[in-house]
Amino acid sequence: MAAIKIHEENDQNVKSIAADIKPKNKILFKITKFNPHVDTHMKYVDYDVEYEHWNTVLDALLMIKHKVDPSLALRYSCRQASCGSCGMMINDKPSLACFTKINELGSDVVKIEPMSNFPILRDLAVDFTQMFNTHKKLKPYIIRSDSEISQSNEIKEFSQDPDSVEKYIQFANCIKCGLCNSACPTMATDSSFMGPQALTQAYRYVSDDRDKGKNTRLKIIDERHGIWRCHFAGSCSKVCPKGVDPAMGIQFLRSYLLGFRD
Amino acid sequence: MIRESMIMKIHYATALGSVALVVIHVLFRLTQNFHDSLKFDNVITNYSLLPYSILLELILILISIHGFNGLRVILLELNQGQKYETIITYGCLASMIALITYGSRTILMTSMGMI
């Protein structure tokens, strides 16, 4: 008797789980196709995509690439918002494709475009050269005259208390995905502007009390297309997938130059 | 070459200074009707008052510096290039000096009774 009862309960559970599973949804993807060496202007190509509620935009794009259009060019790697490779405009907002669920877009059409404010290599892949060059220009590393390893091979530690770490730790989460630069209204017109990504990284090292390169970095950012061209629109902070607040970092950095901070 | 931070400090200071002085200027205008304040004789009388002439001169200088630097910034963001940026920077500087000179000439001539 007991065995039959358990069996009946299991049957009911299976039925209720089956009722919860929804059939696959369909959605229209409008994807930009553009080869700057061949095309004169961008065009949109439509793809009907079936998706499950757990699918991300990157899943859908890879599905299209593998089953429908192998020529679709996009950059991706980790699929878990760690590498910062799959940045693109999703329904007009700079987002990581691997970090955006189709379900959460709340739209019947998903418009996919390459990130704004970057030169396009092909389709959804953009050129990061300028962003990385600016990033390097601001010396994104600890500058000190001494080293953790002495000549006698003794290793010492540049220790920090938790309060000191708190000052910069959120800015150390930057994955260099370029979404902030893509959202920046100044970058849209000023191609020489350093951009929120590089400026935030400058603040990350300037505010690190182990670092001694503050004056060097402040000199680099204090130029015509440097920190002063930020209009504090705040769109960079809104789109950051890692919760970094570049707009705040830039304002803190500015306060050093205005003499409000030492 | 002045550093950009110094230029921006001047930019912010001139903005604050202009607001304070324009408030005083507007308060002076409230002492009479708006239409009366623009009458030729009243305007000339204002200029002949030395403290008020100094106030107008300061407003002219502060707003010219602030305005032309603002214009320079807007134009620098609009387009880039070494030659273009040099033209814009020196063009705005020259225009600012020209405007201050012309405005000062008007204030001086009027306050000295030459108009």
Image: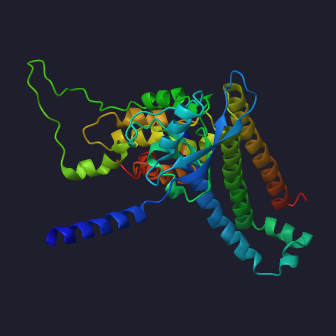
Q: Nearer the viewer, residue B60 or A149?
A: A149
Where residue A45 sits, quadrant-wise, is: top right
Q: Nearer the viewer, residue A247 or A223?
A: A247
Measuring 69% from the left and 36% from the top, which residue is drawn there? B89
Q: Nearer the viewer, residue B93 or A124?
A: A124
Where residue A21 sits, quadrant-wise, is: bottom left
Measuring 69% from the left and 45% from the top, which residue is drawn there? B74
Q: Is residue B58 left or right of residue A151?
A: right
Toward the front, the furthest residue is A1
Q: x, y (%) of residue A221? A: 48, 37
Measuring 80% from the left and 69% from the top, which residue is drawn there? B46
B30 w.r.t. A76: above or below: below
A166 w.r.t. B5: above or below: below
Q: Nearer the viewer, residue A211 or B46?
A: A211
Say how the picture is coloured. Answer: rainbow
Q: Quadrant of the N terminus of chain A?
A: bottom left
Is residue A222 in sight in this rendering?
A: no
Q: x, y (%) of residue A245? A: 43, 51
Total count of labels = 0
Measuring 39% from the left and 32% from the top, which residue is drawn there? A216
Q: Is residue A176 left or right of residue A128?
A: left
Is residue A197 in sight in this rendering?
A: yes
A58 w.r.t. B61: above or below: above
Q: Is residue A150 left or right of residue A209?
A: left
Q: x, y (%) of residue A116? A: 61, 40
